Image (cartoon, rainbow, N blue to C red):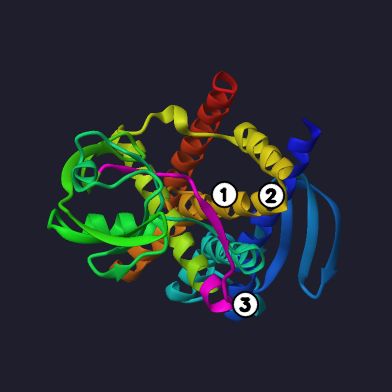
Amino acid sequence: MSGNIFAFIVVLGVLIFFHELGHFLVARFFGVGVEKFSLGFGPRLIGRTVGRTDYRLSLIPLGGYVKMVGEEPDTEIDPALIPISFTHKNVYQRFAIVAAGPLFNLVLAVLIFFLVFATSGISVLRPVIGEVDGASPAEQAGLKPQDLIVSIGGADVSTWEEMSAMIKASQGQSFEIGLERDGARMTVDITPELKTTQNLFGEDIERYLIGVRPLGDWLPRELTLAESLTLSVSRTWEIVELTVLSVVKLIQGKLPATTLGGPIKIAKMAGAQAREGLTALMVFTAVISINLAILNFLPIPVLDGGHLMFFTIEMISRRPVSIKVREIAQQFGIFLLISLMIFVIFNDIVNP
């Protein structure tokens, strides 16, 4: 249990630090004064004041914040501080400062994936057939278990993923498969069939398949720094798309709300990943960082996305949203977040 809590604090601390660092660096870039840079909420435990900024570690390790000069638009401010006031910066600068937090969480994910790929490489699934479905195009074409697929339609393939993508791209057109069996090369013609399968969300989708399953032959592959960077950006984007799609499915009711997890579930998962090793914990941190970024981009008052929504309205209407409207929206946002927190904690308890 203590291991779970420690892993949770480490993961959360890294995510919060990068998030707040994004706000801080962009605020300073635009000349905004920063009064506090805090990891955690509540009473100050330790810290150091450098210039105007109090860098502190606070008691409650469940978040963090950057307190900027003139952050509250309805408070009086010393005229001498107006040049470094957040509120007195133009709307595009304020937008960039707020957006920098979740964007830095995405940058963190890219950096973590890059470190993992550059140091550990990746494992690839070789296109070796393990099973052939009965009455399938593969069986009719004479494919057998242990066959190594080397080409699709004349194009070389080296992984199962590449093979699947080429079959899908065929759109049902016949093509030639090059294979290696018992050390001998041969080719067969095959026509994939349209089958109904289920995606990650349990929805029925139609895909072109030939009716084979992998043997499970994994091979390690080292990557160059350029390949590691490219793959880290690609992997981050894939998870962004999946996360956004998951949010949409939740709103549509196509994904059960019981799949939502809160701090208890995250702590358990962090602990489990920590026991698997540093690499597993790093990948878990990257995935959670992406989820945190998407959550913060949601147009909910109190979150960064809520502020970005107000700034967008200000850009279009050329005047800021009234304080009254923002106050009401903030109250609604707080109610929504508290309700969501209660729900996910309840989920964690009843679905351990």
In the rendered image of this protein, does residue 133 appear above or below residue 299? above
| Cα separation between marks 3 and 1 | 33 Å
| Cα separation between marks 1 and 2 | 9 Å
User: Which residue is at the far left?
Assistant: 173
Q: Earlier in the sequence, mark 1 or mark 2?
A: 2
Residue type, mark 3 in image:
Ile
Q: Magenta region: which residues?
A: 211-228
Give SS at disc 2: helix
Q: Is residue 198 found left or right of 214 in the rendered image?
A: left
Residue under label 1, please give it.
288
Q: Earlier in the sequence, mark 3 or mark 1?
A: 3
Q: Residue at x 72, y 62 (%)?
A: 37
Task: Give how far across and how far down residue 267 sits, in percent.
Answer: 67, 37
Disc 1 crowd rating (10 Å Cα; few below 14, some 14-19, many 20+) is many
Labels 3 & 2 near each other (Cβ < 8 A) = no
Question: Within the image, what quadrant is residue 26 found in?
Answer: bottom right
User: Which residue is at the far top?
Assistant: 350
Residue under label 3, please give it.
84
Question: Within the image, what quadrant is residue 352 found in?
Answer: top right
| Cα separation between marks 3 and 2 | 33 Å
- Foreground residue among 73 and 170: 170
Labels 1 & 2 near each other (Cβ < 8 A) = yes
